[in-house]
Image (cartoon, rainbow, N blue to C red):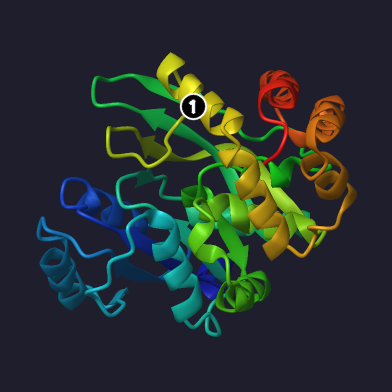
Amino acid sequence: MTDTEIYAPKFAVLLAAYNGMQYLEEQITSILAQKNVALQLFVSVDKSNDGTESFLLKMAEFDKRITLLKMGNTFGSAAPNFYRLIADVDFSDYHYVSLSDQDDIWDECKLWRAHCEMKRTGAIAYSSNFTAFWSDGLVLDVNKALPQRDWDFLFESAGPGCTYVFSKDFSIELQIAVKSSTVLGAIEHHDWLFYAIARSKKYLWCIDNWSSMKYRQHKSNQVGVNVGYKSFFQRVKIVLNGQAFKQVLLISHVCAINHSLIVRRGLCSGRLGYLWLALKANQCRRSRKDRIYFFISCILLAVINPLI
């Protein structure tokens, strides 16, 4: 008997679904095929009109590793659906909690690799690189495993939430934060928030340079990969109209760091604050390209939008 047969780490996998019939079966099949681990798949469905609920009911009858949370809710986007999963699932019987989208394809060693890397590094949370793919055959390896910066967690996530794995202890902390927060409904990106909560507490987060999954790109992606001019200008618009920094302020509130220097002097001091933030760009984003964009955006904000 091998070591992995003696000890199989237990994972609670949280999947948020909405009108997922086109890709859901392939996603769930890749989750249930994970090697060297024990898992239970918890699914929360945003009220759908394509047969998603009935399909999942049949899958849950066939495989007892699938648990459906009470259906009929309308969430409107992925973030509140994931907040519901974090709030409602009991994590006490699991070693880890993992997040999943409904339309990707996981490597069969995704969860085992996360377990091994978290044990090796002592991290309480894990994310990884991924391979984006499109229906026309285009494939792109995306590198998220860049050195973390002092304040990067306030301005970006660790990567897509579907690569995230949390320890049980941190999952319970997240659960408490989600249940007690009064501003979650205004925070649009759960993956960004969860990364910020961990890093604001000085917890170790491992970003693996291994690609753990195929990340499907299509017109229904809520965020997707930042590729092409259209995606770039959409993000620039969100920054320059103040929407992005409003999210930062909300996240800083949940993390109880809204009085920190980066928030107080940078985001809440008008033109001079944005100029100060521009000079701190190296501490705010991980990639060199994103630091340049951040610097330029802060300068532009100081000129055209002095108060968020």
Please name the residue shown 12% across and 58% down the image.
Answer: 49
> What residue is pinned by disc 1?
226
The answer to whether residue 85 is above or below residue 305 is below
Secondary structure at numbered mark 1: loop
Whether residue 1 is visible here, answered yes or no, is yes
Tell me where residue 21 appears, x and y as whole percent: 16, 52
In this rendered view, identify the residue nearer to me: 195 or 42: 195
Q: Quadrant of residue 133?
A: top left
In this rendered view, identify the residue nearer to me: 42 or 259: 259
Left or right: where 22 falls relative to 153: left
The answer to whether residue 217 is above or below residue 108 is above
Tell me where residue 270 appears, x and y as whole percent: 79, 36
Tell me where residue 107 appears, x and y as whole percent: 42, 45
In this rendered view, identify the residue nearer to me: 269 or 121: 269
Q: Amino acid at mark 1?
A: Asn
Left or right: where 281 falls relative to 70: right
Q: Quadrant of residue 256?
A: bottom right
Tell me where residue 96 appears, x and y as whole percent: 56, 69
Q: How many marks?
A: 1
Please name the residue shown 60% across and 37% down the image.
Answer: 242
- Mark 1 neighbour density, 10 Å: few (under 14) some (14–19) many (20 or more): few
Please name the residue shown 55% across and 52% down the image.
Answer: 191
Whether residue 2 is visible here, answered yes or no, is no
Please name the residue shown 66% across and 56% down the image.
Answer: 251
In this rendered view, identify the residue nearer to me: 294 or 71: 294
> From the image, which quarter does the C terminus lie in?
top right
Left or right: where 221 falls relative to 198: left
